[in-house]
Image (cartoon, grey):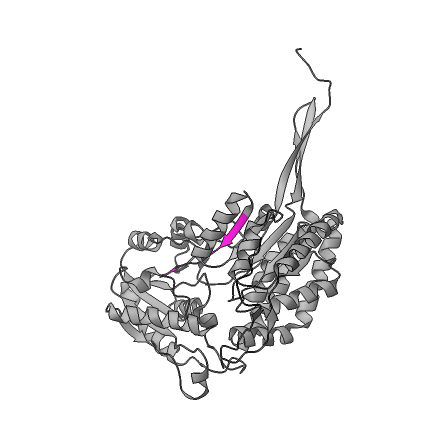
């Protein structure tokens, strides 16, 4: 039951200016109960629909997202602070790609036929779980909503989606898009609120699964609460991912990968390769080129198409990141570039932090161990392949990893030994919908995207069919 202890409204802000951009009413306990009842009723009819028709509706929704790309990208930029060049190219369109992919998958979801000899056969059915709760994070609000909704709906589930209270706006627009595409009322509904609403969704007996994108502490709390009712969970959590550069790598390409893996979206990406291990023979060369290119990054108004680095999402996140930077400096970690809050001119109204590079002598500093979630990269030298594999795996996290080398045999050999759910070779942070995405260890449970997601939004029913009379000994 939702115990209403939070404010009655959400006031999202523009991180570039600190100004309130909207007022969103919080879902009340009574409204939540009504939405859950509506969703459970609507889900039955949705699941009974021909899968190909479910796919057509998802495809129409994808087309509408693409048609509204500029409008939704602008809204996402104003609420998250991400540069408009990012949101126009990635945030909305990747959500549309996800809807389109599962639109095609919907009609292929099926069980198996099992031959049991002359006297019987068996088959399995893939059935929807029922009502799914999606809980989103603030760094990719619309994309995450699509990543959760598309497979859930393709499989015949209904979904209640709670966006982060910091970025509530584009998920509400997605509900509009689904309605315009012909999705029946109640099958996808957005609920707005704070942590108490997330807990209510997780604990509610009429919700069959929770899919969370968030922090490790939140993931542990969700799993514990869901466990009391033995409900399904998918958790996509944090990371402290390694990016390994061997001495035969294309250095400029590796620098590009490291910059994308740390500074894109102002570093607010869960899979970021924030521990950049560089083989010592090329360490100085790598650092020189990295520092030179970082100095040229354009920081400023995220609505300017030329801006490459925008603000952090909130004052609290900015203060957290600056705290990590100050602690690293206090521990004697060498600062290579950045390290300041930017306050010149209009930047002082927002939450801007310079892209920051540290060089650490070893793995003991907190900046090497802790997830920062900001534009902060730590570069570390290494000598041997075995050494860097051991150091890369020496973390509670296991979301992602990258390997840069021209030796394709070594690339596959190293990737096979890394404790990470998603790995890239000579690339970083590219997440095509066709590939499953998710982590191991404290970075999560389950997978999003790809055919693997179907496993997490369906249950299997086994059916035994007798073809001969029972041979009864009684």
- Residue under the image location 24 percent in, 67 percent down: 331
The one nearer the camera, 248 or 20, is 20
Q: Quadrant of the C terminus?
A: top right
Q: Residue 112's spot in the image, x, y percent? A: 66, 37
Specify start and end residues of the magenta stretch as a single range.
233-245
**Residue 4 at what x, y percent from top left?**
56, 60
Instruction: Assign the magenta stretch its main secondary structure.
Output: strand
Closer to the camera in the image, 404 or 102: 102
- Is residue 435 in view from this perspective? no
Left or right relative to 325: residue 373: right
Out of 296 and 241, give the one closest to the viewer.
Answer: 241
Q: Considering only vertical position in the picture, is 21 above or below 65?
A: below
Location of residue 283 by image quarter? bottom left
Q: Nearer the viewer, residue 353 or 388?
A: 353
Q: Is residue 318 magenta?
A: no
- Residue 229: x and y in percent read 55, 43
Q: Is residue 107 left or right of residue 234?
A: right
Q: Is residue 237 magenta?
A: yes
């Amino acid at each position: 039951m939702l115990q209403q202890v939070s404010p009655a409204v959400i006031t999202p802000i523009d991180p570039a200016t600190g100004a309130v951009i909207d007022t969103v009413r919080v879902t009340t306990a009574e409204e939540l109960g009504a939405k859950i009842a509506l969703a459970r009723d609507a889900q039955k009819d949705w699941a009974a629909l021909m899968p190909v028709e479910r796919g057509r509706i998802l495809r129409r929704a994808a087309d509408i997202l693409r048609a509204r790309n500029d409008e939704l990208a602008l809204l996402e930029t104003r609420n998250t602070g991400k540069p408009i060049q990012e949101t126009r190219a990635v945030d909305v369109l990747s959500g549309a790609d996800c809807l389109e992919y599962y639109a095609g998958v919907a009609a292929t979801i099926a069980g198996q036929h099992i031959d049991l000899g002359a006297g019987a056969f068996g088959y399995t059915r893939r059935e929807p779980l029922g009502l799914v709760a999606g809980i989103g994070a603030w760094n990719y609000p619309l994309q995450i909503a699509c990543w959760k909704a598309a497979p859930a709906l393709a499989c015949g589930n209904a979904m209640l989606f709670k966006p982060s209270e910091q970025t509530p706006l584009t998920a509400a627009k997605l509900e509009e898009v689904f309605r315009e595409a012909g999705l029946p009322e109640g099958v996808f509904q957005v609920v707005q609120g704070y942590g108490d609403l997330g807990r209510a969704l997780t604990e509610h007996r009429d919700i069959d699964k929770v899919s969370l994108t968030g922090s490790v502490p939140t993931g542990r709390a969700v799993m514990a609460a869901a466990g009391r009712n033995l409900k399904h969970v998918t958790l996509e959590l944090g990371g402290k991912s390694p990016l390994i550069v061997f001495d035969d790598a294309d250095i400029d390409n590796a620098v590009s990968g490291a910059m994308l893996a740390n500074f894109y979206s102002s570093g607010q990406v869960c899979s970021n390769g924030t521990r950049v291990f560089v083989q010592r023979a090329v360490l100085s060369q790598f650092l020189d080129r990295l520092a030179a290119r970082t100095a040229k990054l354009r920081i400023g108004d995220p609505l300017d198409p030329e801006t490459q680095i925008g603000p952090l999402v909130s004052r609290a996140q900015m203060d957290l990141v600056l705290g990590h930077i100050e602690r690293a400096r206090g521990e004697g970690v060498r600062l290579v570039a950045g390290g300041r809050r930017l306050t010149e001119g209009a930047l002082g109204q927002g939450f801007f932090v310079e892209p920051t590079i540290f060089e650490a002598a070893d793995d003991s500093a907190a900046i090497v161990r802790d997830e920062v979630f900001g534009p902060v990269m730590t570069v570390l030298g290494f000598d041997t392949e075995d050494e860097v594999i051991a150091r890369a795996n020496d973390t509670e996290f296991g979301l992602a990893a990258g390997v840069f080398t021209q030796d394709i045999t070594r690339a596959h050999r190293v990737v096979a030994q890394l404790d990470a759910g998603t790995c890239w070779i000579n690339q970083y942070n590219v997440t095509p919908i066709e590939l499953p995405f998710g982590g191991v260890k404290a970075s999560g449970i389950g997978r999003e995207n790809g055919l693997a997601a179907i496993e997490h939004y369906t249950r299997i029913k086994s059916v035994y069919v007798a073809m001969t009379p029972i041979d009864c000994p009684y």
